[in-house]
Image (tube, helix red, strand yellow):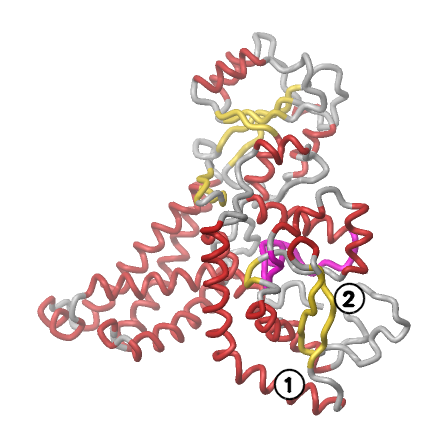
Amino acid sequence: MRTIPLFQHHIKTGFLVLGLVELMVLVVSVATAAYARFQWDALAVAENAGPLLPKALFAALVLQVSMVATGLYQRHLRDGYGGISRRLLIAFMISLIFLTMAFYSLPELYLGRGILGISLVIAFPSLLATRVIFFSLMRTQGIRRRVLVLGAGQAAEVLSRFRRETDRLGKDIVGYVPMGEEAPRVEADQLVELPNGLSPYALRNVDEIVVAVDERRNVLPVRELLECRIRGIEVVDLLTFLERETGKVKVDLAQPSWFTYSPGFFYRGLFHRFFKRAIDLVGALTFLVLAAPVMAITALAIWLEDRGPIFYRQTRAGEDGRPFRLIKFRSMRTDAEKLGVPQWAAENDPRVTRVGAVIRKYRIDELPQVLNILRGDMSFVGPRPERPEFEEDLLEKLPYYAERHRVKPGLTGWAQICYPYGASREDALEKLQYDLYYVKNFSLFLDLMILIHTAEVVLWGKGAR
């Protein structure tokens, strides 16, 4: 399965096709519902529903954005069809809320409760059937992308860990070719011999070649790789392949030259900075108005529980490492760090209050950070700001950690939607790899995708502690 770099963010073509097909399914479901509602009388449909296509397309787009928000298009979705059904039902409920609001504010888009209800009844089994067909096709040999790995040593071993079906969706690693004197570190039955050279084998059996040798000097068949490339076989290095397939940058494999020559890192452009800041200001003001009732109730609940402070201010590292004071709803006891030593939050942390457990699970404690966004300390989307006390250790121990400071920290981010709560140096390394992907591939499109996917994190309480 190929990927398309849409605004530098890698999207699998299979999921892009699935999205287009499901959009058509939703449009047809709405149109079918309208005709069924009026006994297949085209004149009655025109008189009662008006111009049907734009209304059906609008409703379908709202439904599909809700599906994105509930994680139905994430590349590593591991739910079975029962889990997909639950997510689909939640997506329908979310879309009903937004469609109801839209119908009141834009009456010309109104479809009618009958049409909308029938369309959802039609769409639910239709979408499930589409998913069954899609995943069945992705498992067939003729559609799966055949990948040959040049190398079988330490670097190539990373690819042998792609064991989950969702990790291998749409691709098959046909084998590993030992290069030079590297000791093979993959299973013996996965090794491939090329008695007639790389080109004859690759042209018959391979769609893509991944260069994953431990030492490149004097071992790569450069002429044959060039011939494969010219003949239509994609040739990529291991780090680029992993970035594309996993949505993160493997820092243990990265060299400074890779960061220097690979595309990306356009965040500092005036256009991007201006529009990102404008979106932050408009979004923060709108968000503050919409979230005001929830914030008021939360503040009252925190105060009633122990009569302590409502807000908690903590120094965090911002853009270019500059410190700022982050604002949150207090979710821990007032003596959470009575010894004066900063601590990582632990699972089932005893310092968390009863109200704090609820607001942390659904990320309500993060809402006051909208004030940091208005002040310019943060953005809606970016790496999460870390405490300076932890940063000193992380900057020393983790390679390229300072690069995550090239952008403003965010209320949400790529690492937050891809990885659960980080509370150790190992977690910080994993989240750093996602943060570097964001810094490298920043675009307003990626920001939009992260904001939509954040709904899934909140709804499922992912990563909360």
- Give the residue type at disc 1: Ala
- Give the residue type at disc 2: Ala
Q: Is residue 293 left or right of residue 350?
A: left
Q: Nearer the viewer, mark 2 or mark 1?
A: 1
Q: Is residue 249 left or right of residue 35?
A: right
Whether residue 423 is in magenta: the answer is yes
Whether residue 20 is in magenta: the answer is no
- The mark found on residue 330 in the picture is none
> Which of 365 and 141 lies nearest the eye of the viewer?
365
Q: Is residue 260 above or below residue 175?
A: below
Residue beneath the point at 62% across and 54% down: 415
Residue beneath the point at 51% across and 71% down: 284
Quarter of the figure with residue 166: top right
Q: Is residue 91 above or below residue 309?
A: above
> Which of 169 and 8 lies nearest the eye of the viewer?
8
- The mark found on residue 345 in the picture is 2
Q: Position of residue 41 (x, y in %)?
A: 11, 68
Farthest residue toward the front?
Answer: 270
Q: Residues within 10 Å of mark 2 (few under 14, many from 20)?
A: some
Q: Which residue is mark 1?
A: 299
Q: Position of residue 361 (x, y in %)?
A: 65, 72
Location of the C terminus by quadrant is: bottom right
Q: Indicate the secondary structure of the residue bearing disc 2.
A: loop
* Contact? badges 2 and 1 (CB < 8 Å): no
Residue stretch in magenta: 408-425
